[in-house]
Image (cartoon, rainbow, N blue to C red):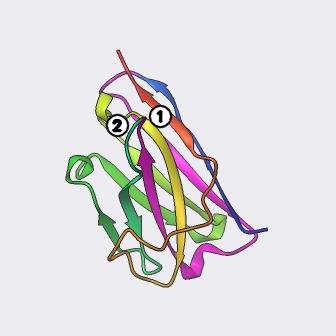
Amino acid sequence: QVQLVESGGGLVHPGTSLRLSCAASGFTLDYYAIGWFRQAPGTEREGVPCISTTDSSTYYLDSVKGRFTISRDNAKNTVYLQMNSLEPEDTAVYYCGARFGSSCRSTGGFGSWGQGTQVTVSS
């Protein structure tokens, strides 16, 4: 069964850091672009960053540039999202999705969603 599993969320104070993990089972991530998405209550799911098969990163949201870093470890079949200087506006359920092929040029076409991991930033 092809599946992604997100982990690493939690309740943190503003200004602190979290690292999310996206682990794949049933397929290898080597041939997939992997995107992190988030969805806050009452809003649509939005793309955050994406990493291509060639380790090129695309940050869809200007608000996370310089604070979030996406990386991948193909040996562990896992993609990470390092989130620094967290803000209350980052509160959301974070999902990762996979899209076959190398490109991160758009936020469409991702699938194999996991159950998500909740990130809550609050003082």
Amino acid type of the residue that numbered disc 2 sits on in the rendered structure: Asp
Numbered mark located on residue 119 in the image: 1
Q: Is residue 22 above or below residue 103?
A: above
Q: Where residue 11 sits in the image (x, y, percent)? A: 49, 24
| Residue in the image at 36% along x and 74% along y | 56
Label 2 Cα neighbours within 10 Å, binned few <14 / some 14-19 / many ≥20: many
Q: Is residue 76 above or below residue 40?
A: below
Q: Are the residues flagged by discs 1 and 2 in contact, CB closer than 8 Å?
A: yes
Label 1 Cα neighbours within 10 Å, binned few <14 / some 14-19 / many ≥20: many
Foreground: 108 or 76? 108
Q: Quadrant of residue 14?
A: top left
| Residue stretch in magenta | 13-41
| Residue in the image at 60% along x and 73% along y | 29
Numbered mark located on residue 86 in the image: none
Q: Secondary structure at mark 2?
A: helix
Pointer 2 residue? 90
Q: Where residue 55 sits in the image (x, y, percent)? A: 41, 74
| Residue in the image at 56% along x and 41% along y | 117
Q: Quadrant of residue 78?
A: bottom right
Amino acid type of the residue that numbered disc 1 sits on in the rendered structure: Val
